[in-house]
Amino acid sequence: MTNEVLFKYLVGPVLAGWILALIAGKIIIPILKSLGIKDSEREEGLESHKKKAGTPLMGGIIFLLPMLIVTIPYAVKTPKMWAVIILTLGFYIVGFIDDYIKVVMHRNLGLRVWQKLLLQFIVMVIFVLFVNNTIEDFYSMYIPFLGTEVDLGWFNIPFLFLVALATTNGTNFTDGVDGLCGSVTAVVATFFAIVAMMTTSEITPVSAALLGGLLGYLYYNVYPGKVYMGDGGSLAIGGYVVAISYLTGLTLWIPIVGIIYAVEVISVVMQVGYFKITHGKRIFRMAPIHHHFEKGGWSETRVVNAFTTVTVIAALIGLIAIKW
């Protein structure tokens, strides 16, 4: 691998994404403030979070826009990257609509569950139609540590929908502490950038650009956060993770590298299920699980450091699980 290739596909997109996100933050945050697009903490939420009310929301565009600007010139010659763009942007639009209803139209619940599922279904249909007509062997998946491939046949598309639903919920739940979702996803994006660079460099720029964008976004989002990504940003991240994992054949790596996403979802499912079964009892102090640790006395910074460290270790295990 030459230095020219390394810069073109990895280093360059990271730097470009980072610089563009830093610039975007300086422009977008004041605009969000002037438009009154701000977060409102729930009454039943953590007491320490209530002081965050008024923080600009819908800041996911700070890292998404640089990702698109950097990636699209590469995507012109690489249809596979369009798959990532379609799913990432599609889920961003769903989240954006949800945020808009909550913040601008002042309907606290946002989209109804069936409405959100319907919009996600439409995005997935568009995505499936695209990959079915442009990418061969898109649904083939490697098995961790074994290196053998598996194809689910007729169950491929239902499985894709399930993976997308679970992953986007995971990234959405993870966005509950300043800097958490951005930090965890920066590690995930690094993992997929490395994998892509070692296998097929043509799709590396999209992960590299997202990594750079997230690093720039985190400048504004680490505690105390000056802006939040909103549902648009967190759902866009879920779309990216699903698309890039399929393109690299590492779909089954999502629970490994994205272990935090998985644990966040599982903690909510366990909490809700146990609450209903026992008529009011709880497993965790509060769900998603990052709030459980906050209730136990952890600072937001400690939660982010711990969860990011776990993700780094999981990413290293993920690299070992690949049969290069």
Image (cartoon, rainbow, N blue to C red):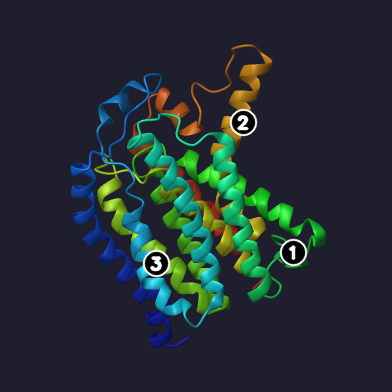
Is 297 positioned to the left or the right of 196 in the image?
A: left
Residue 68 circle label: 3
Residue 195 is situated, as x and y percent measured from the top left of the image, at 55, 69
Along the line of sight, which residue is nearer the eye, 107 or 321?
A: 107
Residue 269 circle label: 2
> Contact, CB < 8 Å: mark 2 with mark 3?
no
Q: Mark 3 or mark 2, which is nearer the start of the sequence?
A: 3
Tag 3: amino acid: Leu
Q: Which residue in the rendered view is the most extreme toward the top?
A: 279
Residue 258 circle label: none
Spatial CA span between label 1 and label 2: 30 Å
The answer, for residue 213, to whether it is visible in the render is yes
Is 89 positioned to the left or the right of 19 in the image?
A: right
Residue 178 is situated, as x and y percent measured from the top left of the image, at 34, 40
* Secondary element at tag 2: helix
* Secondary element at tag 1: loop
Q: Mark 1 or mark 3, which is nearer the start of the sequence?
A: 3
Q: Residues within 10 Å of mark 1 (few under 14, many from 20)?
A: few
* Residue at position x 23%, y 38% in the image: 36
Spatial CA span between label 3 and label 1: 35 Å
Q: Residues within 10 Å of mark 2 (few under 14, many from 20)?
A: some
Q: Residues within 10 Å of mark 3 (few under 14, many from 20)?
A: many
* Residue at position x 41%, y 63% in the image: 210
Q: Which residue in the rendered view is the most extreme toward the front?
A: 105
* Secondary element at tag 3: helix
Q: Which residue is mark 1?
A: 146
* Residue at position x 64%, y 69% in the image: 131
Along the line of sight, which residue is nearer the eye, 109 or 179?
A: 109
Tag 2: amino acid: Val
